Image (cartoon, rainbow, N blue to C red):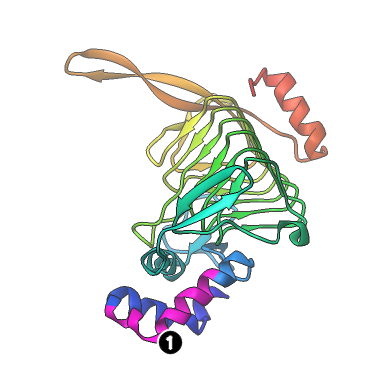
């Protein structure tokens, strides 16, 4: 969809040469791109129809990042001036307006939850007093719980739960960098951090306090030998924080990692499976 969009060459040209933003045609292309992003007609990242070069080995789904849409977001910041926004007793001073039309969209946002213009939430999504940044996409039935943050361009699937204090990292630069991807049915426990384009595949469970970066070792310890993943949590994995030893010149120290200690069952309902995972593996949330 996005790769063939007629707005793409106009945005890309303006990103290479900012002087083109003085042209009404190029400025309008940037504004229209953000408008369509806000409406869910465009997404920063989408599942690829065919295998992609450099995709994670063994991943059932691969994702394509549309760099030109992130370029449009960066250009949009340049086009916007600072302004005062008043919402009841609250005053904001920023470049990006708040998202509007939540009632018509069927999206619940609990005060003082904040969703920025240019983010898209499907009908039935819920944002408690958390934050959803520009370029993000949040699927139906997903809850962004209290003080959870969804960073710029992050993609959150349907039927997910981001528990209290979760930090989903954002990325705008470089434009080609993959955002964080949380696929459908994922449960993300309290104070979990996921950054640097990590992909958490369908129906995985991340226990409280797990930290996932592009370089974090994700160790499957369910078999006779450790299987190591980086940048990707396999579907239905149950993950908890862990450490492993590493030798430095000053001695041996424990460094953080993540441990896959089991799998949610494919044969059971998601809710039942989640409860079973938390009970059977004693995963803190």
Asked if residue 238 is among those painted magenta in the image, a careful observer would answer no
- Residue at 59 percent across and 65 percent down: it is 38
34 to the left or right of 274: left
**Nearer to the camera, 132 or 90:** 90
Residue found farthest to the front: 89
Question: On the rendered image, what quadrant is the N terminus found in?
Answer: bottom right
Which quadrant of the figure has residue 37? bottom right
- Give the quadrant of the C terminus: top right
The mark total stands at: 1
Residue 3 located left or right of residue 268 = left
Q: Residue at x 82, y 39 (%)?
A: 269
Q: Is residue 51 above or below residue 256?
A: below
Residues 105 and 152: in front is: 105
Q: Position of residue 34 (x, y in %)?
A: 52, 69
Give the x, y percent position of residue 125: 72, 49
Residue 184 location (% of width, % of height): 68, 48
Magenta-colored segment: predominant secondary structure? helix
Q: Relative to residue 110, is residue 80 depicted above or below?
A: below
Q: Is residue 136 left or right of residue 213?
A: right
Residue depicted at 57% across the width and 43% down the height: 90
| Secondary structure of residue under mark 1 | helix
Task: Identify residue for label 1.
Answer: 25
Residue farthest toward the top in the current orientation of the protein = 251
Q: Is residue 26 magenta?
A: yes
- Count neighbours of disc 1 (C-alpha within 10 A) and say few if under 14, some if 14 to 19, many if 20 or more: few
Image-quadrant location for residue 103:
bottom right
**Looking at the picture, does residue 203 appear above or below residue 61?**
above
Do we see residue 236 in this rendering?
no
The segment highlighted magenta reads 19-34
- Quadrant of the rendered structure where residue 27 is? bottom left
Residue 176 placed where, x, y %? 38, 62
Q: Residue at x 73, y 46 (%)?
A: 159
């Amino acid at each position: 969809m996005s790769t063939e969009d007629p707005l793409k060459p106009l945005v890309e040209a303006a990103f290479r040469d900012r002087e083109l933003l003085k042209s009404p045609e190029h400025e309008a292309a940037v504004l229209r791109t953000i408008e369509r992003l806000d409406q869910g007609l465009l997404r920063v990242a989408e599942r690829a129809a065919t295998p992609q070069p450099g995709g994670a080995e063994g991943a059932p789904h691969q994702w394509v990042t549309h760099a030109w849409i992130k370029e449009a977001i960066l250009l949009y910041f340049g086009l916007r001036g600072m302004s005062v926004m008043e919402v009841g007793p609250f005053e904001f001073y920023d470049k990006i307006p708040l998202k509007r039309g939540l009632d018509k969209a069927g999206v619940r946002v609990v005060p003082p939850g904040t969703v920025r213009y240019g983010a898209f939430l499907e009908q039935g999504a819920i944002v408690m007093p958390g934050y959803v940044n520009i370029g993000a996409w949040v699927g139906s039935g997903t809850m962004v719980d209290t003080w959870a943050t969804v960073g710029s361009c992050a993609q959150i699937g349907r039927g997910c739960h981001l528990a209290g204090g979760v930090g989903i990292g954002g990325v705008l630069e470089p434009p080609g960098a993959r955002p964080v991807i949380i696929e459908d049915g994922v449960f993300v426990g309290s104070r979990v951090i996921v950054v640097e384009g990590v992909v958490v595949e369908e129906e995985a469970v991340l226990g409280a306090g797990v930290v996932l970066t592009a370089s974090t070792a994700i160790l499957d310890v369910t078999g006779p030998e450790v299987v190591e993943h980086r940048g990707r949590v396999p579907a239905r994995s149950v993950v908890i924080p862990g450490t492993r030893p590493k030798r430095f010149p000053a001695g041996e120290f424990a460094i953080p990692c993540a441990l896959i200690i089991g799998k949610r069952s494919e044969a059971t309902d998601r809710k039942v499976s989640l409860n079973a995972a938390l009970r059977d593996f004693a995963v803190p949330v």
